[in-house]
């Protein structure tokens, strides 16, 4: 199959239309071909931040594939004419990739903390390397250390889970030193699948209310983020829709 999925413009970013099986197939081919690919499970925060922050948009461009992690983003793609049924939810993507490749491939995790790591490793096999150290993309010695760890580990798959926007800035600093394999940004997925935090129920995800479920469980940490970026996503949907629709019609008619 083609490594790069069909895509449509969402505001100022290309979002790819694909399923979990597409991600698995792309990773499998990348590993077999000894090439490299970077995949992001993107949500409405990412789309909105890419509009208002040029620095972030530049870092986001280091990803080869962006698949929608939230239903509002899927709905927008459908309005543009995209043939997409559901999300590639970060925790589910992580589980499927882990179950498919953990027994045969070297997996490295960058992110989360020792508590999540301990809980995860009670349920699943250990990755070859899990970095829980605090990382600062602005500190050159910090990034040089991380580059050395990656080169020494030589992983087939890297799960990047430092949160937004830090994960994007870290990848921007280290991407040229990753010679092969798949890098997948999955946000806080390990906190969820380890059982440390509650996974959003499927029906709530399908209704597009995953943000509300998470806000209920972590109000202090998330209320400012969702108030700002949910509002921006609605606003940008109105501003960019006609332009994105025209672009989509041209792409879909190719």
Image: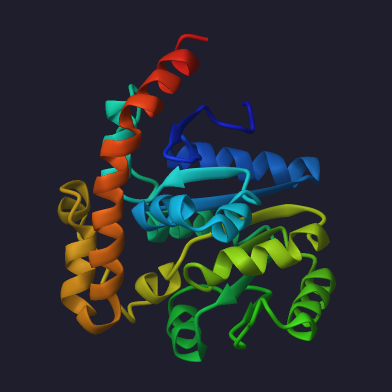
Do we see residue 18 in this rendering? no
Q: Position of residue 41 (x, y in %)?
A: 46, 52
Residue 20 left/right relative to 132: left
Decide: is 92 above or below 160.
above
Do we see residue 127 in this rendering? yes
* Residue at image coords 57%, 50%: 39
* Residue at image coords 62%, 49%: 63
Decide: is 47 above or below 18.
below
Residue 25 left/right relative to 207: right
Residue 150 left/right relative to 251: right
Decide: is 46 above or below 212.
above
Q: Nearer the viewer, residue 76 or 50?
A: 50
Quarter of image, res 138: bottom right
Quarter of image, res 158: bottom right
Quarter of image, res 104: bottom right
Colour setup of the view: rainbow
**Residue sitting at the far top:** 253
* Residue at image coords 73%, 53%: 181
């Amino acid at each position: 199959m083609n490594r790069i999925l069909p895509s449509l413009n969402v505001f100022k970013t290309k979002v790819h239309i694909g399923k979990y099986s597409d991600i698995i197939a792309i990773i499998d081919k990348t590993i077999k071909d000894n090439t490299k690919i970077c995949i992001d499970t993107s949500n409405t925060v990412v789309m909105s931040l890419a509009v208002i922050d040029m620095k972030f948009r530049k870092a986001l461009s280091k990803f080869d594939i962006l698949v929608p992690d939230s239903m509002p983003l899927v709905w927008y793609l459908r309005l543009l004419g995209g043939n997409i049924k559901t999300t590639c939810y970060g925790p589910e993507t992580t589980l499927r990739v882990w179950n498919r490749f953990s027994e045969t491939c070297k997996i490295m995790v960058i992110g989360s903390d020792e508590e999540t790591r301990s809980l995860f490793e009670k349920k699943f096999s250990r990755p070859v390397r899990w970095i829980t150290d605090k990382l600062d993309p602005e500190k050159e010695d910090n990034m040089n250390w991380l580059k050395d760890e990656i080169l020494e580990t030589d992983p087939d798959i890297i799960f990047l889970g430092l949160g937004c926007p830090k994960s994007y800035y870290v990848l921007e600093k280290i991407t040229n030193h990753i010679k092969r394999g798949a890098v997948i940004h999955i946000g806080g997925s390990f906190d969820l699948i380890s059982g440390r935090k509650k996974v959003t129920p499927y029906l709530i995800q399908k209704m597009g209310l995953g943000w509300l479920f998470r806000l209920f469980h972590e109000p202090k940490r998330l209320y400012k983020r969702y108030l700002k970026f949910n509002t921006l996503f609605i606003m940008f949907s109105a501003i960019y829709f006609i332009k994105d629709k025209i672009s989509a019609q041209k792409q879909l008619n190719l």
